[in-house]
Amino acid sequence: MARLMKINSVLKNIFMDEEGTLPFDKFDESLTPNLRALRLSMSMADALLSMDVAASDVVDMTLGVTDTYCKRKVQIEIVSTLLMFSQDRGDDREPLTLIRAVGSRDVNMRQIQRIQELIRSIHKGKLTLEQAEKKFDYIMDHPERYPLWLRTIGNALISAGVGMLVTASPIIVVIMFLAGALTDNIVRIMSKRRMPAFFVQIVAACFITMIAGLVAWLSHEGIAPILNDVDPNYIVVGGIIMLAAGMTVVGAVQDAIDEYYITANARLLGVVMMTAGIVVGVVIGVYIMRTLGIWMDLSPTSSSRIDLPLQYTGATLLAAGYAIGRHATMLGVVLSGLIGFITYASFLALNMGSLSAIAASGVAAAIAGALATLSSRVSRIPSIVLASAGIITLVPGLTLFNGLMGIFVDSNSWTIDNTGSALLLKALFIALSVAGGVSFGILFTRPLRRTLTRAKRVLPRRKLQG
């Protein structure tokens, strides 16, 4: 018995501190408030990063949570899809380090907005830790989404809006809308079965190209006389832009500017792979058509009739459709459509002036980023949401398609001519100009937005006379 008491005394000296308590949290099944706060902030960062929010914004927002609930500072590092939270708890306690791998989620603009509003409330001290945990769990367990049919319509409007931008015929616009709706369902079904995004893009692009080939065959054979004067290539162009709309280039470029180089490289590589999937899908679709003896002109040209009201309508519907497909609020849909309209109008005005398409796209994208940042303060909608919707009108879908089709210089060989290579390079430069321009607009306008906010807060408030 004396020996057991001695062993017990030795164990106490090893594992107990002077107050007789366990100094190591890992031996206690209950979580301390500090660890609960770290877990809450990491879960928020996981949710935001998985929906393509820029890494710098994720760090800024989650640090607001840890600064409120944690007594000691927390260091946050994001490396590609890896979250690392580290807290130095002094010389007498072990440091805490939490690591989590981030997956991918469908972008839900309203969910992003609700998480940001929760973080603002936490930063202002309006919620206790327990209240914040319950509210965050509710947000994640009860996401606000549009019905499936409305989301399909939103994504289909992207394809139809492209038809209006290139002033295609009403028949083609309708076909582009229907093709977009069918493609959206194909993408959704394949994504639910955990198909890699690269192969999803291939199948979707091939399907769209086959629809264009079917329209060309019906017109050539005289089976559908109503299609005789239409250009089915616009169906492919609309599909390219609809598929490219899911690539969040803005966040990737912003990560690079904010010196999150590994994260930016990973996201940009994902964009490259998805774009390659579109290219491969179109090539396979064209090859199948040629094998079946179906031919169509592989050089779409814009209509000689410049119908500006129709183009502005298409730009508005395209941006609004993008917002609907990402579950934005109705105010977000309206603002997205308005920013899309202004962005496209700015691009046309600049391009018709002395600027090239590359320079005009960059300036117009900067305008979109600035408008998105300023309006986000009033609407409480994340600026990345409005900016991404606004620049959809600038995606070089027609240039990319013409460059891709420039690969086929004759019917019997697969070679790349100089014209096709130049157009593909031009499409790349336009895409980089758009991404860099919108990131510059967002970063440049943030100090102005903070200044306006501070000025608003110090303005004297007049009391209403009763």
Image (cartoon, grey):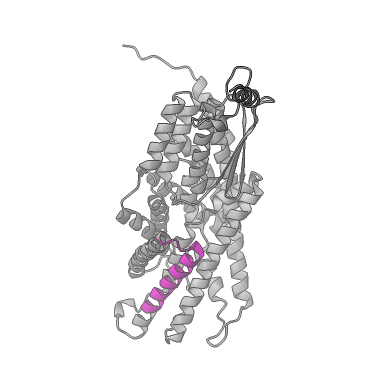
Outermost top residue: 466
Q: Is residue 371 visible?
A: no
x and y percentages locating residue 216 in the rendered image? 39, 79
x and y percentages locating residue 375 in the rendered image? 46, 38
Q: Is residue 348 visible?
A: yes
Q: Is residue 114 above or below residue 240?
A: above
Q: Is residue 190 above or below residue 59?
A: below
Between 247 and 458, the one lying in front of the other is: 247
Q: Does 13 appear in magenta?
A: no
Considering the image in quadrants, where does the C terminus appear?
A: top left
Residue located at (43% from left, 27% from top): 130
Residue 278 is left or right of residue 190, and the answer is right
Query: Which residues are the magenta region?
Result: 193-215
Outermost right residue: 91
x and y percentages locating residue 182 in the rendered image? 35, 66
Quarter assignment of residue 154? bottom left
Q: Is residue 37 above or below residue 347?
A: above
> How many numbered circles does the render carry?
0
Residue located at (62% from left, 78% from top): 417
Name the chief secondary structure element in magenta: helix
Between 343 and 51, the one lying in front of the other is: 51
Between 202 and 391, the one lying in front of the other is: 202
Residue located at (53% from left, 42% from top): 370
Q: Does 204 appear in magenta?
A: yes
Residue 264 is left or right of residue 161, and the answer is right
x and y percentages locating residue 437 in the rendered image? 59, 50
Considering the image in quadrants, where does the N terminus appear?
A: top right
